Image (tube, rainbow, N blue to C red):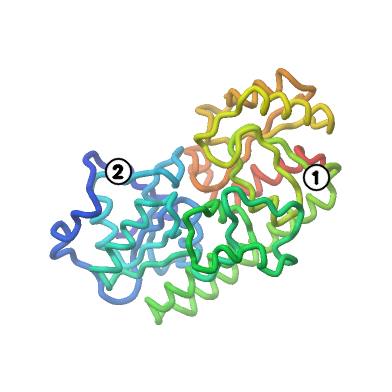
Amino acid sequence: MNLSRRTFLQGSAGSVAVGSLAGCLDGVARTGEGVDSGYAAFFALWDWTQHVTGDEASFENPVGAGEMGHGWEPDGTLVTDIASTDAFVYLDLPEFSWAQDVATTLEADYETVAVIDGLEGLDDELLDWDHDHGHNDHDDHGHNDHDDHGDHDRGNVDPHVWVDPVLAREIVTTIADELGAAAPDSAETFEDNAAAYNDRLETLDERFRTLVDEAERDVAVLAGHNSYKYLQHRYGFEIHTPTGVSPQDEPDFDALSSTIELVDDRGIETILYDRFEVAGEDDLPRQARTILEGSSATDAMPVTPAEGTLKTWQQNDWGYLEQMEEINIPAFREALGAQ
């Protein structure tokens, strides 16, 4: 299967229950050695894996443009398609339960498929949904705040770990190491590709640090659920949102009122909103419009957790780095007043 880097599955109708795979996958052909093809569970992982493998393998992202990876469910023959490839890259988190189910099935019955958890070895770096470290940096906390993850129970973990460029480098390295173990003849290529990509992630990390150093304020307002706690923890600024971290949360009147008061008190001119919460380029989520109309703020800019992609970004060949550099860096610069 020779696919371009920006190929996406469209999916087909008809759900396939993971629990019924044992009978469905009998006789499925796989290479048995090396890594020629595979799947990654959502956009950021897919983009990183493609950078690691380069021309050595073709990976696919099953989540279509405009959709997010968490809460997504597969349909059609996707599960059997994954089992017929050489590798599956995912995050072992409840928000990606379909991927957990696939990984469990593959590990139990299909040992020729390399199952790669990008979070392997990172449990001490994961934040809880309700975790608040204030303005401490990962490099300074000595991991003491994460003792509750000692048993590797990820049931209460904020899943948005990939937005942190520093932790992204760790995940990229894990992907390269595990793919190299599955394909020893390509291991050096994977390692070199990962190192080159991680240099770019290091540059992104430096841009965020410079941005925060130059900022006039240490708080940004986000009209929507907070997918960026790893960023605020890494770089020492606050993201205030009337909603919280869950996309199902809805703000009440008091939360919106206090957010508007914060915007006025801190002289915030630009508020942020999640690009994936609106349908069109010029649309604004209801929360963002309410805050703009009720406060002294004059502008709203989109941000992206880089968990998915849009058709326009796909056409521009934008990956994770491009989303962070072209969307998030300018938006946070404006929101924090970094001139």
Q: How far apart are the alpha carbons under marks 1 and 2?
A: 43 Å
Q: What is the number of callouts on the image?
A: 2
| Pointer 2 residue | 11
Residue 133: x and y, percent? 70, 54
Q: Quadrant of the C terminus?
A: top right
Position of residue 123 in the picture relative to residue 337 (left or right): left
Q: Local crowd at mark 2 within 10 Å, few (<14), some, or many (≥20)?
A: some
Q: Report the disc number at residue 238.
A: none
Please say if 200 is above or below 34. Answer: above
Please say if 83 is above or below 96. Answer: below
| Pointer 1 residue | 218
**In the image, what residue type sits under mark 1?**
Asp
Task: Tell me which label, 1 or 2, sits earlier in the chain.
Answer: 2
Q: Nearer the viewer, residue 123 or 88?
A: 123
**In the image, what residue type sits under mark 2?**
Gly
Residue at (36% x, 49% y) in the render: 62
Residue at (60% x, 56% y) in the render: 127
Residue 40: x and y, percent? 40, 57
Report if residue 152 is visible in the image. yes
